[in-house]
Image (cartoon, rainbow, N blue to C red):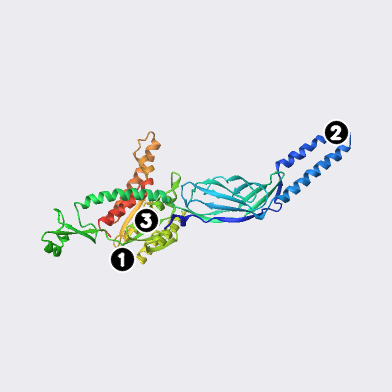
Amino acid sequence: MSVRSLVPGPATAAAIGSRRLPFAFAPRFFLLLAAGLIFAVPAWIDSRAIVALAAWNLAVVAIWIVDLRRIPAGPSLAVTRAWTTPLALGVPSRVGVEVHNHSGLPLRVDVIDDVPEALRRDLPNLAVAVDAGASLRREYDIAPAQRGDAKIGPLSLRVRSPWAIAERWLSAATEQTVRVFPDMPEARRQSMFLLRSRQVALEKRRARVVGLGRDFESLRDYQPGDEIRNICWTVTARRAKLVTRVYQPERSQAVWILVDGGRLLRARIGDRTKLDAMVNAALGLAEVALAAGDRVGLLTYGRRMHARLAPGRGGPHLRALVDALATVPAERAEADHAGAAAAVLAMQKQRALIVWLTEVAETAGVPDVIDSAGRLSPQHVVLFGVTRPLEMMAIAEAAPATEEEMYRMLAVQEMVERREVLLKGLQQRGALVVETDPGEATAQLIDQYLGVKERNLI
């Protein structure tokens, strides 16, 4: 998948009148009118000064009309909004605005872009002085604070000629919808660092141990500690010495990633939600699994199914995964975990790795998500990923200073212990459980995935 394919396309439009009266008086117009007040003093003595004052005001208005008619609109003045990089959550980027002046008059243009708060807190205001028959580009910064689709409005322009007496209010229909993707650079950084470390450790281990995986890789001389079942007897007979088969983890296996978009994932960790952290982890895991030759499927859900992609491979499939993860909404209601488990069981008949990214509620009974994950574990390998409750653990481990803090600590300790009991119960039913730290969810999930592959659990 090319990074350039994720960059939003440019939007270009001609500048046209933006309101019922698309013109205004520039500050210099009022300065000229104020200059005419010099006739007000002699008007007390000679009434002809009043006529001179009126003539001056009419002349200023006439000059304003001439200046207004000189200011171009329509095809003579166009604006382009251009994006420089893909939009990713929390990753600063720049947006370029280029003014094309096809008229024969130099212009001063103030450009205001209608950018939503999800991309920038305030509206950017760019001052551009563009020569006749030329184009000039200015840029402003954005910092996307929310995943998904963001609607950009038109560009508003305030245009003045060199006289700066009149000004036109114009608008360019550059409305477009852009997509803010997960934090792909951070996910890729964590996954690449982890892969390099794991590769070094794996190569060291392979010097002592063979038999990892079930796909044949190569032959080598027998070493103490090799399993007898891995000896290739036909080659041993030809070479008159023991030769061992070396295997690698099996490829082209199915990996399903389930992302819960329910209310528990709306909780914030710093400037992001738990759902944002899980989406980044899902994207990093998907890239690693596809690079390893596995087929990756995706199911995102809340009260209903948001996206459902059957396991696949290749660049187009990765692009579909990225688009689906970018638009996972955080719902206010509890997610339908039983429906998600039933959908996976209906679509995946053969044994697969199910990576379920969710959160566990502290309730009196067994949460629905625990029961649903337990339904999958006999047939599939379930990797159950939740975030570690750091704030609760800090409260549970703190020394209370007051009676109120003591009761609070005891209540939190009970919640933490119940959570541990639920997760241990899920492990006893055959699932793998990983509690991820907020900033390391991607690396920890990839590490678990690689461990599953190395141990041939699928």
Please state, as top left, top right, bottom left or bottom right, where the C terminus lies in the image. bottom left
Tell me: 342 left or right of 104: left
Quarter assignment of residue 295: bottom left
Res. 42 mark? 2
Label 3 to label 1, Cα distance in Å?
Answer: 22 Å
Q: Cβ–Cβ below 8 Å for labels 3 and 2?
A: no
Q: Amino acid at mark 3?
A: Glu
Q: Amino acid at mark 1?
A: Gln
- Closer to the N terminus: mark 3 or mark 1? 3
Quarter assignment of residue 226: bottom left
- Closer to the N terminus: mark 2 or mark 1? 2
Res. 350 mark? 1
Q: Position of residue 206 (x, y in %)?
A: 22, 53
**Other residues around mark 2 within 10 Å, as few (<14) / some (14–19) / many (≥20):** few
Q: Amino acid at mark 2?
A: Pro
Q: Residue furthest left?
A: 240
**Other residues around mark 1 within 10 Å, as few (<14) / some (14–19) / many (≥20):** few
Res. 287 mark? 3
Quarter assignment of residue 35: top right
Q: Is residue 215 above or below residue 281?
A: below
